[in-house]
Amino acid sequence: MRLVYFAWVRERIGRTDEEVEVPEGVATVADLVRWLKSRGEEYEYAFENEAVVRAAVDRVHAGPDRPIAGAREIAFFPPMTGG
């Protein structure tokens, strides 16, 4: 699965994207975030306030309870405003 990071999420993690093999039991976006936070300080910092970071599964906005099975790409980004 490809993970993509944008804006300050990318800056805090220190990479734009990565390929990961998600462990068994990681079934939702929220599970994925919890697993990522366990991977190191940079992830813990990027997701310190899980409610703020947004996700898109295969380019469709997704909430924390969205299943990730079969997803090819999950993107994480801060909230955006229009103008």
Image (cartoon, rainbow, N blue to C red):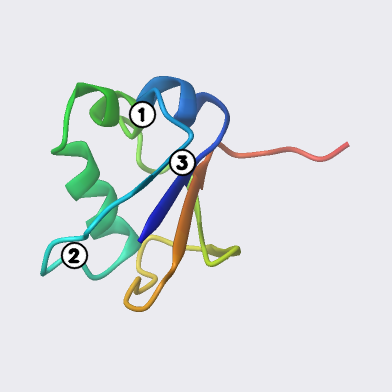
Q: Quadrant of residue 25?
A: bottom left
Question: Do callouts 1 and 3 mark residues in contact (Cβ within 8 Å)?
Answer: yes
Residue 82 lies in quadrant: top right
Give the class, few, some or many, for how many residues have Cα within 10 Å of label 3's Cα (few <14, many ≥20). Answer: some
Q: Amino acid at mark 1?
A: Ala
- Residue bearing the label numbered 2: 26
Q: Amino acid at mark 3?
A: Val
Q: Which of the two discs, 3 and 2, sits closer to the camera?
A: 2
Left or right for 11, reference 80: left
Label 3: element kind: loop
Label 3 – label 2 distance at C-alpha: 18 Å
Asked if residue 18 is positioned above or below residue 2 in the image, the reply reads: above
Mark-to-mark CA distance, 2 and 1: 19 Å
**Image quadrant where one finds the C terminus:** top right
Q: Which residue is mark 3?
A: 53
Which badge, 1 or 3, is on the more N-terminal residue? 1
